[in-house]
Amino acid sequence: MSGPRVLEVRGVDFTYRGGPAVLTDVSFSVEAGRNLALVGESGSGKTTLVRLLLGLLRPAAGQVLLDGEGLPGRERALRRAVQPVFQDPYSSLDPRQRVDRIVAEPLRSLGLVPAGDRPELARRVAEALRSVGLPEEAARRYPHEFSGGQRQRVAIARAIVCGPRVLLADEPVSALDVATKVRLIDLLAELRESRGLTVVMVSHDLTVTASLCEDTVVLERGRVVERGDTAAVLGSPRHPYTRRLVACVPALPEPGGNVHRL
Ligand SMILES: Nc1ncnc2c1ncn2[C@@H]1O[C@H](COP(=O)(O)OP(=O)(O)OP(=O)(O)O)[C@@H](O)[C@H]1O
């Protein structure tokens, strides 16, 4: 089942100032309800693409679209619709702030809850923490009091508190041990069911993306070499680069299947 295109990348080229081309003619779309994996080796341009999708960089050519319209001038709509979760749970949370303040940040900065309405902020924070499997009392603690997996849950709570439609997760589990990784992937799968959240996940780990994402886009040196249904792209890869990526993985789970079996 697929929904409307929430995000679309159309013919995008990108170069960091004075450098070589990092992305060339990249096109794909994110459909509501279908999780999408962006895979490729280190340096293939995945993180650069995430920055473009978040509106932090602008393409040299082509367009990034939200609900069919170009991004420039629509930063607020983009922030409401698309929230990021980054790789390193140790550096992505401000160590000086309590979890309640960290998680409430998007509500304050987007002006969704007046800063003075403490009961409403507390209610929304508690609800987000509950959704990611953290106890309500986590709100009163600081990031250093949590494990890496719990910190990533705090980061996910912050990302979902404003009710976005897309979670843009850049290597969200690569810093975690296997058991913690599996639990977080399960959580991301649950959030789609419970909140209708579509996940765009960047990873070089096909075992992680294949268990969560129906669609896969394969990047090689800034170009899309393959894209489509994950089972087809990874099950019978047509491009030699995808074959090499798949060959590095001992066994792939079915999309929607269970990563525990690996
Ligand atoms: N701020 C920057 N300034 C200049 N070049 C950059 C910058 N960030 C990334 N690059 C270059 O752009 C290319 C793509 O990098 P990017 O981080 O997007 O790849 P990636 O696929 O996410 O890699 P990794 O999996 O290692 O994170 C690399 O050659 C990198 O050196």
Image (spheres, grey):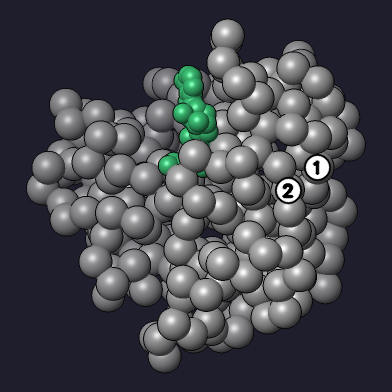
Which mark, residue 212? none
Quarter in which the N terminus is drawn: bottom right
* Place of residue 54 in the rendered image (x, y in percent of width and height, measured from the top left): 61, 30
Name the one closer to the observer, 16 or 63: 16
* Place of residue 29 in the rendered image (x, y in percent of width and height, measured from the top left): 79, 49
Q: Identify which residue is drawn at 40% across, 21% down.
A: 116
Residue at the left extreme, as displayed: 145
Q: Are marks 1 and 2 in contact (CB under 8 Å)?
A: yes
Name the one closer to the observer, 148 or 13: 13
Quarter in which the C terminus is drawn: bottom left
Which mark, residue 224? 2
Name the one closer to the observer, 124 or 2: 2
SS label for mark 1:
strand
Measured in 3D between alpha carbons, the distance from the residue under mark 1 to the one under mark 2, in whole angstroms, is 7 Å
**104 relative to 136, above or below:** above
Q: Quadrant of residue 37?
A: bottom right
Instruction: Give the class, few, some or many, for how many residues have Cα within 10 Å of label 2's Cα (few <14, many ≥20).
Output: many
Which mark, residue 27? 1
Looking at the picture, which amino acid does disc 1 mark?
A: Ser
SS label for mark 2:
strand
Q: Is residue 111 visible?
A: yes
Residue at the front extreme, as displayed: 240
Q: Quadrant of residue 20?
A: top right
Left or right, 39 with reference to 65: left
* Place of residue 117 in the rendered image (x, y in percent of width and height, measured from the top left): 43, 27
Left or right, 241 with reference to 204: right
